[in-house]
Amino acid sequence: QVQPVESGGGLVQAGGSLRLSCAASGRTFSLKTMGWFRQAPGKEREFVATISWPGANTNYADSVKGRFTISRDNAKNTVYLQMNSLKPEDTAVYYCNTRDRALTWGQGTQVTVSS
């Protein structure tokens, strides 16, 4: 099964920004609501944001609302997560998947926010 490939993570100071990307081969994301999820050490994987097909509607977890923006480029079969005003509690491995988590999980991308 096709796996998403996440990238763009890194180490950033509190208040900084990062832009994550998620891509897959073919048209894996076509017609699907896509989402970003994250998992911090010792915690369950949690929802961060979703974006409908082809991109008119978005939804965010309360913890990231107003700081993160999800978008998609359907021609490139890619989903993005712009993260601003990062906080130490945003530290986690970030993953993308369909809203109902139907794809095989990728490796994710590590985001570490220092205080």
Image (tube, grey):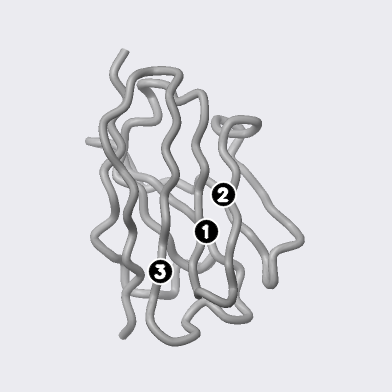
Q: Are marks 1 and 3 in contact (CB under 8 Å)?
A: no
Residue 97, placed above or below residue 111: below
Give the residue type that dot 1 points to: Gly
Whole-percent x and y of residue 79? 51, 62
Q: Are marks 2 and 1 in contact (CB under 8 Å)?
A: yes
Q: For the C terminus, which image quadrant?
A: top left
Estimate how packed mark 3 is, as few (under 14), some (14 to 19) or many (20 or more) residues with alpha carbons within 10 Å. Answer: many
Measured in 3D between alpha carbons, the distance from the residue under mark 1 to the one under mark 3, in whole angstroms, is 12 Å
Whole-percent x and y of residue 101? 45, 67
Q: For the N terminus, which image quadrant?
A: bottom left
Residue 51: which numbered mark, if any?
none
Going from the N terminus, do you reach mark 1 or mark 3 first? 3
The residue at which mark 2 appears reads as 49
Q: Farthest front residue?
A: 75
Whole-percent x and y of residue 19? 44, 44
Give the residue type that dot 3 points to: Ala
Give the residue type that dot 2 points to: Ala
Classify mark 1: helix, strand or loop. Answer: strand
Q: Residue at x 60, y 43 (%)?
A: 69
Query: Going by the image, does 32 lie left or right of 46?
Result: right
Classify mark 3: helix, strand or loop. Answer: strand
Q: Is label 2 or label 3 in front?
A: 3
Measured in 3D between alpha carbons, the distance from the residue under mark 2 to the one under mark 1, in whole angstroms, is 5 Å
Estimate how packed mark 1 is, as few (under 14), some (14 to 19) or many (20 or more) residues with alpha carbons within 10 Å. Answer: many
Going from the N terminus, do you reach mark 2 or mark 3 first? 3
The residue at which mark 3 appears reads as 23
Q: Residue at x 47, y 53 (%)?
A: 36
Q: Is label 1 or label 3 in front?
A: 3
Classify mark 2: helix, strand or loop. Answer: strand
Q: Residue at x 23, y 36 (%)?
A: 41
Q: Residue at x 58, y 62 (%)?
A: 72
Residue 35: which numbered mark, if any?
1
